[in-house]
Image (cartoon, rainbow, N blue to C red):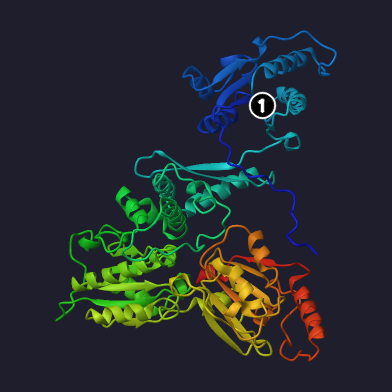
Amino acid sequence: MDLFPPPTGGASLMLSFRMHSRSVLIVGGDALAASRAYASLEADAVVKVFVNGGLDAVCEELKWRAEHSQLEVVDWDCLPVPEPTSDSLDIDTSKMSRDMGALNHYLASTSISLVCVTDTTSTSPSAAVARLRATHLAKLCRARRIPINITDMPELCDFSFAATHRFVDPASSSKTPLQIGVTTNGEGCRLAGRVRRDIVAALSKDVGVAVRKVGQLRKMARKLDKSNEATADDEGSEDSTVATPNRPVPIKALGTSEESSIEAARRQMRWVVQVSEYWPTSRLAAMTERNMKEILDGEVAREGTILTLSAAADEKKSQHGVDITPPLPNQTKGRILLAGSGPGHPSLLTLATHTALTRHADIVLSDKLVPAPVLELIPPHVEVRIARKFPGNADRAQSEMMMAAVEAANRGLTVVRLKQGDPTVYARAGEELAYFRAHGYSPLVLPGISSALAAPACAGIPVTHRGVAESFVVCTGVGRQGKTVSLPGYDRARTVLVLMGVARLGEVVRTLVMIEGGGRRDGPAYPPYLPIAIIERGSMPDQRVLVSTLEAVESALAGVGEQRPPGMIVIGWAVLAFGRREGEGGDAGEGVLDDVDGDVEEQERRDRQRIARWLGGRKWDVWEGLDAGWAHL
């Protein structure tokens, strides 16, 4: 039985390789050679083009670039040829022997990192000679351990070129740091280009600008203390081995500034990760330097500290200059609507919340977990602000949003306070209601579909099922101020739904399975083989469901790589109630409540057999994506 998923061959080792003035040798002078040369130049490589005949034998682009000193065209016929030796390559013709000898001598005296051959695609008689020469060239490069790519001869290639696209700033047309690449691993180069175009078309036009702005924000975070070591360890590095951006950090008390430079650097870099993970692309692209400083400084209740998606909030005008905000008769103060956005998919918004966002809102104060597709429904004239509920800053961000809501309502605006899921399920609705009432407002609460129930349903997991689960309990993996909470004890007929617990998975699992529970479990210990599911990005197109057992789930989560917040945990026999997603085995959970034996060892043996059949002999399984039918809703 495999502890980790076995590798499946046939993939490429996808690298983002920066040349840093290393040399690339291109054999050929056609348009494809020009394309390879341009890609290499953008990667800061030194490009040398080998072709018989020199400048007169290359395409117009290569000739122009050579004349402008961007690359060097080398006439193969003019290269010096060393004296033959006993270990010379066995070449069929004297011309080819001369070319290979000259190239071998050149490679011996020059540092070349990559070789690319493009003159093997022609249908002319010379193509046969070029292909034969490429075969000997591949042998020569391998002897010198130089990776080589030969067009249309994949069996001789050490690497391949992806279909790439580099994003530009739509305002200035300047190149941005963002590139994407698509490879079909030799199964369809033309199709790779089409897939690349489809990806580019699906992404926001300012996604490259967003990458540039996040890079600027990251540099600002690193400048907090140039000499401290925090930015080099796992806690301070954005690209660390920590799989979740929600890993807990110490909470900085309100009104205090007692924080070391190392602690501040760690906190700020974690906030960079949070912004990258949660904020809509349009918001990232619109960040100003002032916004970036506000993100990193952590101060509360300063004017402008809550970050705005739309700068047009004070100009609620149509394109013809007419005020389109409907007046509120006999009302001098505004109003506050406390609304739930549902689990994430826009079609799971309630009609009331959709109406509030699209017809009534003057300003929307959104939690960071509300996904971009929901925020995109809001008309562009409506101001949208996103809470800075980053690890260690939740209380400060909560205060900011409540104060902003009252301030906007005092100006006569309709405020929609938008919460993920249902506002009354672990979303601090009670705190906000008390605050707003203390300031003279009685908000209208618009319930939302709770992710606690919707995410399992979208994953094909029923929280109750006849003969498998008779009840369920919803709890949280973290308490107020980051403190631990008490989890319920084991009941075979009950499903446990844990929200906000994936970042603390190890702690949750140990609390459940320890005999004594560490004083943080109210009831019997859970069997280590009990089924568990981690649902990430529930109801969204990139939904991922990891199914395993309590004893294997930590290794499983580490094995699937980077996490996709937000996530929740489902524990209990209901996880396997409908069998495997592919439909194998029918109802894998059938008879769970009927199959109860007083013999504990025999019961465990049968339960483990049931789970082994469900997982197909593996330790875990992963279900990727949302059912295709959701695309039409």
Q: Which residue is drawn at the image coordinates 64% and 22% (left, top)? A: 111
479 or 623, which is in the foreground? 479
Q: Position of residue 316 (x, y in %)?
A: 22, 63
Q: Amino acid at mark 1?
A: Asp
Q: Nearer the viewer, residue 195 or 43?
A: 43
Question: Around disc 1, counting alpha carbons within 10 Å, would you say few (fewer than 14), some (14 to 19), or many (20 or more)?
Answer: many
Residue drawn at the location 50% of the way across and 64% of the way down: 248
Closer-to-camera residue (478/63): 478
In the displayed structure, does residue 82 sit left or right of residue 220? right
Quadrant position of residue 46: top right
Residue at image coords 39%, 53%: 284
Q: Quadrant of residue 127?
A: top right
The quadrant the N terminus occupies is bottom right
Give the total number of marks visible in the rendering. Answer: 1
Would you place residue 22 above or below residue 520 in this image?
above
Judge whether 251 appears above or below 164 on screen. below
Query: Above or below — where is 229 with respect to 139?
Result: below
Q: Is residue 361 visible?
A: no
Left or right, residue 59 beside residue 329: right
Where's residue 78, x and y in %? Answer: 65, 10
The residue indicated by pointer 1 is 119
Residue at 51 percent of width and 25 percent of height: 61
